[in-house]
Image: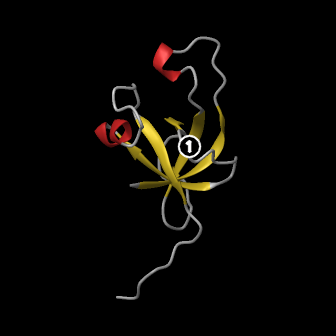
């Protein structure tokens, strides 16, 4: 799983039929200190309904389709949870 911050939503005039009822968000990948860690991506937000600025967990690749109610839907990334806090374990 990856950490990211929701930066906004995507509004589409045309979508693949499988994505018509799905919410798309722009996610900025971040590290555990919430520093940018790569380029922003577009991800499906099927269950979470994350608000802009929310820290989220997201998955990509085949894990993204596995996270959806219908695994035949096209997805490269999907938000799978909201992060309420990060706790570091001393070691």
User: In the image, residue 50 lies at what x, y percent?
Assistant: 63, 48
Query: In the rendered view, does 12 fall on the left or right side of 65?
Result: right
Point out residue 42 in the picture as x, y percentages from the top left corner.
Answer: 52, 34
From the image, tell me which residue sits under label 1.
27
Residue 88 image position (x, y, % from top left): 46, 80
Q: Determine the image quadrant of residue 23.
A: top right
Is residue 73 placed above or below 3 in the rendered structure? above
> Is 81 drawn above or below residue 14 in the view shown?
below
Q: Position of residue 67 (x, y in %)?
A: 39, 43
Q: Secondary structure at mark 1?
A: strand
Which residue is located at x 39 percent, y 31 percent? Answer: 70
82 is higher (above) or lower (below) than 28: below
Q: Choose between 71 and 78: the one closer to the eye.
A: 71
**In front here: 78 or 70?**
70
Query: Would you place residue 86 above or below residue 34 in this image?
Result: below
Snapshot quadrant of residue 10: top right
């Amino acid at each position: 799983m990856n950490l990211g911050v929701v930066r906004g939503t995507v509004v589409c005039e045309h979508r693949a039929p499988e994505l018509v009822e799905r919410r798309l968000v722009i996610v900025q990948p971040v590290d555990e200190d919430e520093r940018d860690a790569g380029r922003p991506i577009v991800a499906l937000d099927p269950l979470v309904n994350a608000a802009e600025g929310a820290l989220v967990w997201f998955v990509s690749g085949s894990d993204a389709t596995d996270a959806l109610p219908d695994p035949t839907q096209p997805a490269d990334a999907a938000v799978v949870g909201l992060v309420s806090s990060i706790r570091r374990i001393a070691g």
